[in-house]
Amino acid sequence: MHSIKVIVNNKTKSHATVFLAQVLCCAWLTFLGASATASASTVPQKFASKNANTHADLTLHFDTPGEHWENDALPLGNGKVGAAILGQPLLDKIQFNEKTLWTGGPNSSEDYQYGFPENSSDFSVTIKKVQQQLRERLNLTPSEVSEQLGHKQTGYGSFQSFGDLILSFPKTHGSYTNYKRSLDLANATARVSYSVNSINFTREYFVSYPDNSLVVHLSSTDLNAITVSARINVPDNRSYTQRTAFPRSVEVSGKLNDNQLEYAAILSAQTKRGSLHISNGQLHIKGADSVTLKLTAATNYQLSYPNYRGESAISRVNEQYKAANKYPYPQLKQRHLHDYQTLFNRVSLDIGQSQSASSKQNHRSVLDAITTDQLLNGYPSDNVTLNRALEHLYYQYGRYLLIASSRKGSLPANLQGVWNKDSQAPWSADYHLNINLQMNYWLANMTNLPETLPPLFDFVENLSVTGSQAAERLFKSSGWVVFLNSNPWGSIGLIDWPTAFWQPEAAAWMSLHFYSHYQFNQDSTFLAQRAYPIMKSASEFWLDNLVEDANSGLLVATPSYSPEHGNFSVGAAMSQQIIAELFASTKEAAQLLEDHNFEQRLAKAIARLDQGLRIGRWGQLQEWQQDVDDKTSQHRHVSHLFALHPGRQISPTETPKLAQAASTTLNARGDGGTGWSKAWKINFWARLYDGDRAHKLLSEQLMHSTLNNLWCNHPPFQIDGNFGATSGMTEMLLQSHKGTIELLPALPSAWPHGSVTGIKARGNIEVAMTWQQNALTKAVFRANRKGKIEIQNSELAREFALMRLNLPVPYERLASNKIRFSSAADQVTELLVSGN
């Protein structure tokens, strides 16, 4: 009989040695707190839906009512409806949104043309004139170009506040004590409590996705103690009617004045004892033991070009009301928790905010004693645990906000997620396509929240309809193209703001999100039916519109503009890098789908394409073809580092000179900027394997670009920085964009001990890790598909064991710090490092 052979540390071992390795591995498992007899059914519990962090670790809490919406409101949401909780005891004004309630678009009182200029037929001729001017002069000012190509767009619209749910309490509630207000990320529930005349009052608020309702539950420690009036107020830019459509409820409805978009909402009440009567659109409740208020809202918007209208708002809201009204409060809450926690609990992180078992109680009491605004305003403090507590809370807050502002069945998260109090929101709370919408979704796959992505894909596919028209009408070409910003009405984004109107690479960048999703989930159907068509069309546009550079002979985009910085030129770095990434990704997809003709077309174009990667006179990565970068500029945009992140053309290991040039650029630009700018820099430094610098940028964002409620402050409030920071923190722990799973590639010295579970690597692999003294001690890989897995970490140069079901796993050593092994679908493999 032949002896069984496996590869252990790249050497062939006999069966006896394998047995010894098993014994040693069991000892390591015991040492690290894992079961030496773990079976296939027990190991996956490491990824089970059970968050290891305490509620104190995951709670924003305050000891005063909120005064200012932007700084103090606690945000709740289900992707469609958002609510902002200030929690005033006497008059509780709950501002709320329904994400599709927008002015502008078809039927607008202004003449909406989807962003197209009136003289569309002459646009391609004008582009050629601008291209000729650039050949002669090398650059043009933004004003010179916008005067020729810009367009004053009308009927663009703005995201709207739906209104306020106003709860009025007796005057005695103005004299309260023991006030507390909190948002628990573990259950997506806000809570307000206080005392009046020795009676304790509690309010719980959540927005349910399965029941599409804002739910408010009022309770007290005394019987018959709750008296409240509830009504819905709406802004005056719309018609308004109210009626009692169902028992114990009030319905409000109307149309926006601007575009006649319908809206409707139903507010209903369930009470335990007490009385309820309705007058003048208000629910009056007196002497109840408890009260449950439910608010559901809808519009008649539908994401479908050209009319963007669907079923009537009243029909929709009636259906929603009937569905939710079947459930009493305990069931509503349980359905909400089951839905939300299934997503949120997938990822658990410990970066030092959790203490040893002997001191956990003291740790919780410290966190309970310090309010979130105190925690933020005191950061960084001498108490390292408090610093880590804030960073951990901020990380999970980003995941919470994405769940709350992006779920299937509505629009993507906009500049403010799903929250806005104004009739004219900052930047319309729209979809900026030169970084902001993209940044909103960087964290989605890597932090195991793919359910947040359908709104993005639906939105982009709809946008490609007008984008295809733009390619044909404006450029006389195939494919699809859009510019800098868009709205729910399919605008191609051509406006007349000189420094913020031109980015025809936006469609290419948005298309890359489809391919990234495929890389994470490996869904070949999604690749063939959704990702590849949108990518191929974006590539076709650039195959038609790249021109040969007069000096280099390479293919370049012209006119080209580095977002909001400098002059127009030929082949600015960001333009070329995005197109290069698009062509490379589409070529990979074409190969997978055996579209060989298109694969060959792309290969020929790639061979002639200017990659946008040049090192300048002071060692910087050039922003433009000409070596004119200003070493003193600290502009917030660092767009010419796209190739570093989210692109994959620059890496410290494969292109060290370019990586050093990127580092030189980042050092020159500094660590300041707006909230989203700092968030992007966290990701940049993580990709450069500089965890301490990435952590410094995180600290800068917390100190200078974060509001008391932990919303990112542009200023004003802009949510992309929250999402970008969570992405950057994940990149510090795990990277997989180059095809290898890099474990702890940019671990900062501030996080010497810790653990993470449930984050995702490309290839559809869930990863858990623990580390001590800044060194990896254990990693667990759960493969959701059959294939080979490459992992990289410096600790692989030491003694280690790679185990599955307590048996050594064969592997191939690729480098001193890199190995590769095979896995079947749903198999769990453990890496255990000796001596750490």
Image: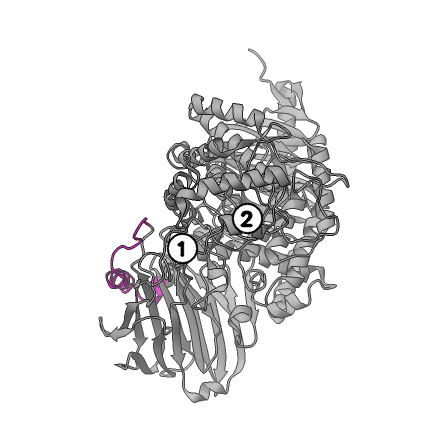
Badge 2 density bin: few <14, some 14–19, many ≥20, Cα 10 Å: many
Magenta residues, start to end: 304-332
Dot placed on the residue nearer the N-terminal end, 2 or 1: 2
Q: Position of residue 404 (x, y in %)?
A: 45, 57
Badge 2 element: helix
Q: Which quarter of the image is occupied by the C terminus?
A: top right
Reply above or below: 589 against 451. above
Badge 1 element: helix
Q: Is residue 686 left or right of residue 471?
A: right
Which of these two is toward me, 72 or 718? 718
Q: How many marks?
A: 2
Which of these two is toward me, 427 or 738? 427
Quarter of the image holding residue 28? top right
Which residue is denoted by mark 2 in the rendering? 145
Which residue is denoted by mark 1 in the rendering? 338
- Please say whether residue 735 is one of the residues in the magenta stretch: no
Reply above or below: 687 against 339. above
